[in-house]
Amino acid sequence: MTSAFGHFTQQPQSNRPAGFRVTGAHLAELYANAARVWGDMPAFATRRQALEWEPTGFRELYNRGCFLATALIDLGVEPRDHVGLLGDNRLEWILADYGVQLCGAADVPRGRDVTDGEIAFIFRHAGIRTAFVETETLQDRLLRLRGKLPELREVILLDPRAKPAEGVRRLSGLIETGRRLRDAGDRRVEERVAQISPDDLFTLIYTSGTTGEPKGVMLTHANMISQLERIPLEVTCTDRVVSILPVWHIFERVFEMLAVSRGCCTFYSSVRTLSDDMRNIEPTFMGSAPRLWESIHQKILKRVKEAHPVRRGLFHTAYFLSHYYKESVFFLTGRSLDLKGRGRIRTAVLGIIHAVRWALLLPWYGFFNAAVLEKLRLVVGGAFKGSVSGGGALPREVDQFFNYLGIPVLEGYGLTETSPVIAVRTPSKLVIGTVGPVIPDTEIRIVSLDTEKILYPDRSRDDLGRGLKGEILVRGPQIMKGYYRNSEATKAALAEGWLRTGDIGIITFNDCLKIVGRCKETIVLSSGENLEPAPIEMRLNQSALIDQCMVVGQDRKYPGVLIVPSLEGFSELGISMNHRSELNGRKEVRQRIAAEIRQRISHKEGFKVHERLHAFGLLPEPFTTDEELTTLFKLKRHVVTEKYRAEIDAMYHRAEAER
Amino acid sequence: MEINQQLLNPVEQGLLAIMILIIMFGMGATLTPKDFRSALERPRGMLIGFLSQFGLMPLIAFSLAVLLQLPPALAIALILIGCLPGGTTSNMFAYFARGSVALSISMTAASTLLALVMMPILLDLYASGFADRIDADLRAAGDDVGFVMPYTNIILSLLLVLVPVAGGMILLRVSPDWAKTAEDTAGFMAIVVILFLLGSVLIRHSNLFLITPWQIYLGSLCVGLIGFLFGYGMSSLTRLPPRYKRSVSLETGIQNGPIAFAIILLSFREPLQSQMLWLAILYSSFIVITSSFVTLFYRRIGKGDWEIHRNNLVHKRLFGEDYHTRYPEAAVGKVDQR
């Protein structure tokens, strides 16, 4: 099961209703309605040059989708067929999706980084007979695997500039064929659309997950439509969304569907051109990995450090004021984290203190907000209402920074299995440290990790069991139909409509969900004590000297950590090396890292004694998405443990010798 | 209301002069020659802006002075404020009010230059009656010199404050980075100067707050507020796009306070000087507060048309100049889509 995806952001807005939206019983109907309502407004934009983009309107997209669907039906794609879709974000991808939905089939998407083994497994498991491939490379790889895929009949190439191999069709050719058929009166698309039931699959997503064989998550039209109608993000037809995360992942996909529903334009960017594109597009929303937010945070701090002393002073004053001002505002509006249930008297006293502080800071905050913070906010593009960050929790420091700066970060939580949103912060429930309240029509249970007892909601308690920690179970219209042809896994995850998330959470006293860690990630020390690696890693990753790290220690006396040191960080200290292996040999480097660990994972920072890291090893290579990370930058812990087994043993030996 | 002692002592006057210098320098650091030229490219907005700034605003000030029966010295001060060109703070407020910053800057630039001609004419039109009354009062009290409106000095003071503005413009050309620092410093100084003046008065003339009659408070408060209202009304009547309306409105109500201080210090002598300064201080303090509220209000009502405008700008930039985006009314409501 894939895990938490992260963080929505949105600016608290005027009282305008949450926004006009287009909807439908299923995606095919949504697409048709969007074409009718939004007409020639730009739906998706493709980059030609920095300042030259090609828009495609909603009506145009829908028409071409119908042509493609007609051609697909003609090729023999049946209703409810599974159609492979290998590739990354681009107009042709969404066009292929339109075609698949409009002929009543479901797509099985994966990105360019899919491995041959995965292709073979997924295509056989899903019984794929027709597949889209984005690039020539993917086409060639798929054709080489053809011997193992007896069911595969048709391959369609998306990239208009790529050269199709023999027997491979071009997307543009199919659209032409479809156009001719429709012009001649072919109305099979309408017949197909009429047959679609909301309970049919619109996609079958194979999650690589962090462990084991891929599982096919069956998501229905009703799942997706329920999300589009309930996600409380104020995206409107005057917004601009940048697409950068892999679209085959449900998290980016729901954003693109949301864009279709709300009528805003999605711009396809790439990692290489992102910072240029941000300036030119001035996006108002985007989905991103936490890494982007961390790097923007670093960039702002760096810019401040290099600024003229007067301006640096102004920034520090502004941030100081804004921090305490916003903290008071958050408290007074019931948006401060409350895990224990504050007493009335305590709340009243704190309330008075915060009210006084608020009133005292208001005029100063007003000026500095206008004069200093507004300019800083331009770093994320002048129009940013915020971002949605996927792949894990934002470090608290970064989270606070943006919220206090005036870029409200609305963190959310969900899984592929929940298509994906379970909970998300809303402007009125923007509680830092939580993922916000659960979205409408969705129920949550917190279940004891040991006894399976329902801790929340527990009607026998006055507080219903708020503040208690356990595994999160969820039920609602967004829950998947099951894992495709894997009843065992389905049974393990789904019971009576309740999905086990595998995540540990707490319901706070202001009814928000707080994610604490993963059940499966929990490291059990030989002493029997449990520890969550994620918070420790998050804290270490904040260091400029550390690029990446992973905490280990299952069945050991104490936890240790594998560290990928930062070349850049050390070069700023005057230790410039071309490669980490040279760096790791330096005694000074080891000392610095050791000091960094001691200082960050300390009692003062809120870490317990058994969480202190007594062993560490330096790695010569960073973790990459090819091997140790999922496409959303989540650690595949078993892969790392396997790969660096020798290093882990060595580091514990070293630590023992030193003790 | 009598101010027996000089409102600001020589040291404070010197400090004030330095602050004015910094503020005007910072104002220059935001301006390029292009801003003056591009004023001509927005003829309709500029014309309406000109009419509100030099047509409406002095008339509002005059009417208030008459209606509230202000003493002649304070009446002259109020009219002087009414005739001033726009200040740089209006550009900042226009930005946050989702107005057209370009129009605001152009109006500031143009009105600063035009003030050289317009201010003497307008003062002659509206303030000469009050000047005659002062002259008569002084002579009756045995003063031989009497009072004549110091037109030459006013023009010279205006020219003098334009020197640091020009200096700032040169700095922007030489080093944009330092110009930015100058701009920030000036923005900060604009607040400091008001606090400094209020503080000086509070420390040495604390009873002044109590003995000032309500008419003076009301006049210095209302001149800006009515300016906002009429500026908006005028640009609505002439059917300017919404973001232009907000700019014209703010530009009309927000005057260049530092120039008022400079003119009063350099052109008027006691006992007029202190009284006039006091009114200018009150105006500058009130206008910061009122324009903050007006800005928040404009920001709120302007959200719809502003987001459309901004989206259109990006679409034109990326999809080509002739790309037109039309929004269904069902989604955006009845909004001026220009």
Image (cartoon, grey):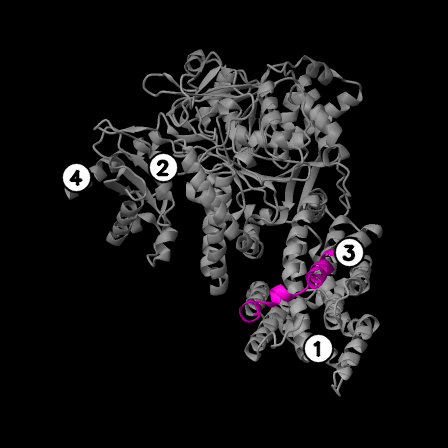
Left or right: where B206 falls relative to A581: right
Quarter of the figure with residue A641: top left
Residue located 62% across and 29% down the image: A257
Q: Nearer the viewer, mark 2 or mark 4?
A: 2
Q: Is residue A166 above or below residue A372?
A: above
Disc 4 with disc 3 on a shared chain: no
In the rendered image, residue B209 lying in the magenta stretch gets the answer yes
Residue assigned mark 1: B159
The magenta stretch spans which residues?
B201-226
The answer for how far apart the CA atoms under marks 2 and 4 are is 25 Å
Percent of width and height locating residue B45: 79, 57
Q: Which residue is mark 3?
A: B231
Task: Give yes or no for contact between labels 4 and 3 (Cβ–Cβ under 8 Å).
Answer: no
Marking on residue A535: 2
Alpha carbons under labels 1 and 3: distance apart: 27 Å
Tell me which chain the residue with mark 4 is part of. Answer: A
